[in-house]
Image (cartoon, coloured by chain):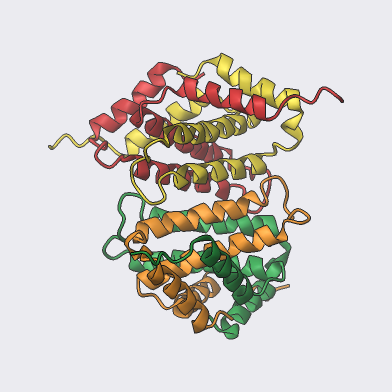
Chain colours: A red, B yellow, C orange, D green
Amino acid sequence: MIPDSTIDLIRTFVRERDWARYHTPGNLAKSVSIEAAELLECFQWSDEPKDGDLEHVHEEIADVMIYSIMLADKLGFDLDDIIRDKMAKNARKYPIDTDD
Amino acid sequence: MIPDSTIDLIRTFVRERDWARYHTPGNLAKSVSIEAAELLECFQWSDEPKDGDLEHVHEEIADVMIYSIMLADKLGFDLDDIIRDKMAKNARKYPIDTDD
Amino acid sequence: MIPDSTIDLIRTFVRERDWARYHTPGNLAKSVSIEAAELLECFQWSDEPKDGDLEHVHEEIADVMIYSIMLADKLGFDLDDIIRDKMAKNARKYPIDTDD
Amino acid sequence: MIPDSTIDLIRTFVRERDWARYHTPGNLAKSVSIEAAELLECFQWSDEPKDGDLEHVHEEIADVMIYSIMLADKLGFDLDDIIRDKMAKNARKYPIDTDD
């Protein structure tokens, strides 16, 4: 789980540095893409993480999550609501194949 | 917060469709980047979300989160641990400016 | 080769639609990333293009090239100059291994 | 224009380092996305390139072009053909507005 205390930690970090002025929705969306590509770079030439690179991978996943949380927060979305809503849509789009 | 029950929902969704065979770390990292760019597309020509586009934005944020959660899970990372670890590194890298 | 007549075609297309007003450097950079991810989507679950998908792949490569050309043009860069300059840097960074 | 001699330079660079073995279509598509995001990073917090950052911007545009050229080449596409084909489709999709 990601508890509310962790989301608050992210909010406090931004507020203490007065970074909300840079954090427009568009800039945060760019930031999510930039961090996603840094994560992808860990897999540029192979499908598995390289030895010794796991800490790097977990940092990049965290960066993607942190900017996504900032953007959801900026737009007033509840994280759990939007994930559950999308999973319900996915379940309707991809029904379980019960034939095999 | 994102409770364990939501993470379990994602795990169950993948298991019921037998999709783990497609979900290599590299393929999931590609998927995070692809969804991040679909989110970015909502802001391609403007910095604010377009009227009536908010549901689309929240779906794309959710997709980024869902694939990030799948990848973290695949690699055995605890989501809260990796976010807190990265936030601690960020706090050291960007100390609070107490001068102004 | 990509002749000047093709670059002019792109310039004329933008001018005839009066799209220069939307084509800020930042918006064009977002567009390059968005199209790059649409290209990546052709390879989301496999390393080779799917049968029958080659036309889609070539359209997405073209979109990446077109937005890159628009951005280089916007900033006054000569395409051939910047590619040759970067290749020279790459050659210094990665010398040919003559040992084997 | 980008002359054939520049495309040949890129081909020779890859051949001299024996990198074709890493350059699967999927890996090259990932590389295009990774470089596109490095370009986007130049515009993460602003719409215009920062002072003194123009060389960095032109290097990143070049990297996107170089990997796109490598991928087109790998798949046997003629660059000029695919750009002209896509521009013809764009012209049909977005007719010139002659009303104003």
The residue lying toward the viewer, choosing from D75 and A67, is D75
B64 is higher (above) or lower (below) than C23 = above
Q: Residue at x 46, y 79 (%)?
A: C8
Rendering coords of residue C12 (x, y %): 43, 75
The residue lying toward the viewer, choosing from B24 and A92, is A92
D4 is higher (above) or lower (below) than A49 = below
Q: Residue at x 66, y 52 (%)?
A: C42
Q: Residue at x 65, y 63 (%)?
A: C58
Quick one: which residue is furthest to the left in this view? B100
Identify the image quadrant of residue C60. Answer: bottom right
- Taking the image as shown, residue A75 lies to the left or right of residue B4, namely left
B73 is higher (above) or lower (below) than C39 = above
Identify the image quadrant of residue B70. Answer: top right
Name the quarter where the C terminus of chain A is drawn: top right
Quick one: which residue is furthest to the right in this view? A100
- Taking the image as shown, residue D81 lies to the left or right of residue C75, namely right
Q: Residue at x 47, y 72 (%)?
A: C10
Q: Is residue D22 visible in the rendered structure shown here?
A: no
Rendering coords of residue A18 (x, y %): 22, 35
- Taking the image as shown, residue B17 lies to the left or right of residue A12, namely right
C61 is higher (above) or lower (below) than B4 = below
